[in-house]
């Protein structure tokens, strides 16, 4: 038995590759844990769910302290110069924005986009089928959600390469620690993206179409509409947060299936429900590992008194493996698991992920079409990991495709 105290150390290479044994010790020995970085982190399902569903907590957590590096203070200033995204708003501002756009992201609305998503995935698989080896992330997982959201918004295919480059740089800003080079690249990309999307929004206002960007520009509730800044932040968020999480879902999920051939066979044969499978993959290796809240009042969490103004991280990846909630098979991948949709990978409460239905659809189609098209799919080498604290995923993922079915 290890004699050292359990810890949450996302800078430990072993933790980045496989955080789940570390989570298990924290759940057992120190479930409300003071991290070396300052905030608390809760690792049990009930505690994480309590924090996420507490309407008195705040998501306004991006304040940068005066002692922070200059480049991080510059990034914070940049954030303050533009309307905040819905990720960083509390009610009633959050409630208003969500009410305006939520009809665009209902399961029924996303279902109407399903045919287009299938077409994009099948076309990409056709292109890949002539190759023996691919990098799953660069050649497939990254391409699918980006192409889907780009076309759903009704943006020109000719612009896809440059928007993809900008969104890749901006995605880094979801992480709490960045290098000066990453901040510089993100700020440059942000300026380019803002200019491009502002022009695109103005174009759609005068030339509406059957697309998501038109729907967002026309979204209205009791006479209230998104102003230009709010619309810009919402569309940017689709490219940044919505894209990266789906990349990780496809990568993490495919890796899990390759490691569990019996589960892969259930998926290929259609003996598992595709929606259940997608939720189980989200549960088993969550694309989003933590979500933070600041307490606005003294609160008892897991029997521990926590003072107001504390920053509390909820370890979503750990909560999704908590045997106290999921039972003794919590660490087992089971694509037929009843109740898999109760995972916390999309958060919970009023900030439950607005794009959850879209991510599920993209992940389901992207994974099932891949593994069924290529029955001999196999690892060419071990994947590498992206070394992110919040967004867990594979950086490179060499695959042997084999013959197409």
Image (cartoon, rainbow, N blue to C red):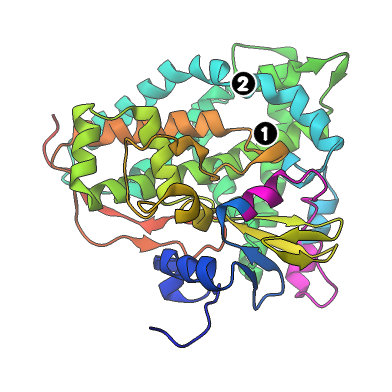
* Region rendered in magenta: 47-75
Residue 288: percent from the left, percent from the top? Answer: 54, 51
> What's the residue at 11%, 37% (across, down)?
403
Whether residue 342 is visible, yes or no, is: yes
> What's the residue at 80%, 16% (across, down)?
220
Quarter of the image with the N terminus in it: bottom left
Residue 53 counted in the magenta span: yes
Residue 158 counted in the magenta span: no
Answer with the quarter of the image where residue 65 lies: bottom right
Quarter of the image with the C terminus in it: top left
Residue 365: percent from the left, percent from the top? Answer: 36, 29
Tell me which label, 1 or 2, sits earlier in the chain: 2
Q: Residues within 10 Å of mark 1 (few under 14, many from 20)?
A: many
Left or right of 206? Residue 347 is left
Q: Which residue is mark 2?
A: 212
Q: Dot 2: what SS? A: helix
């Amino acid at each position: 038995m290890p004699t050292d105290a359990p810890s949450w150390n996302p800078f430990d290479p072993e933790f980045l590759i496989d955080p789940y044994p570390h989570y298990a010790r924290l759940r057992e020995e120190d479930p409300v844990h003071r991290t070396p970085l300052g905030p608390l982190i809760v690792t049990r399902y009930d505690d994480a769910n309590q924090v996420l569903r507490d309407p008195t907590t705040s998501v306004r957590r991006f304040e940068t302290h005066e002692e922070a590096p200059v480049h991080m203070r510059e990034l914070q200033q940049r954030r303050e110069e533009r309307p905040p995204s819905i990720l960083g708003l509390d009610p009633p501002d959050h409630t208003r924005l969500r009410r305006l756009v939520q009809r665009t992201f209902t399961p029924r609305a996303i279902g109407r986009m399903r045919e287009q998503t299938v077409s994009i995935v099948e076309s990409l698989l056709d292109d890949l089928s002539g190759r023996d080896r691919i990098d799953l992330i660069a050649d497939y997982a990254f391409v699918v959600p980006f192409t889907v959201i780009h076309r759903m918004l009704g943006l020109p295919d000719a612009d896809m390469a440059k928007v993809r480059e900008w969104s890749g740089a901006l995605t880094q800003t979801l992480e709490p620690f960045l290098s000066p080079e990453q901040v510089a690249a993100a700020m440059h990309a942000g300026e380019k993206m803002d200019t491009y999307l502002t022009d695109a929004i103005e174009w759609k206002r005068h030339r509406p179409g059957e697309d998501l960007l038109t729907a967002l520009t026309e979204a209205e509730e009791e006479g209230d509409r998104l102003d230009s800044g709010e619309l810009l932040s919402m569309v940017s968020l689709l490219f940044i947060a919505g894209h990266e999480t789906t990349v990780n879902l496809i990568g993490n999920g495919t890796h899990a299936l390759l490691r569990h051939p019996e589960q892969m066979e259930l998926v290929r044969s259609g003996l598992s429900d595709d929606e259940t499978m997608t939720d189980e993959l989200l549960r088993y290796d969550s694309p989003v590992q933590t979500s933070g809240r600041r307490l606005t009042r003294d609160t008892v969490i897991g029997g521990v008194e926590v003072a107001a103004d504390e920053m509390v991280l909820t370890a979503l990846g750990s909560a999704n493996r908590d045997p106290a909630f999921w039972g003794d098979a919590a660490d087992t991948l089971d694509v037929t698991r009843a109740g898999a949709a109760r995972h916390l990978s999309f958060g919970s409460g009023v900030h439950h992920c607005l794009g959850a239905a879209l991510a599920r659809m993209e992940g389901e189609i992207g994974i099932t079409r891949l593994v069924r098209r290529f029955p001999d799919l196999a690892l060419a080498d071990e994947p590498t990991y992206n070394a992110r604290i919040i967004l867990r995923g594979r950086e490179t993922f060499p695959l042997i495709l084999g013959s197409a079915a």
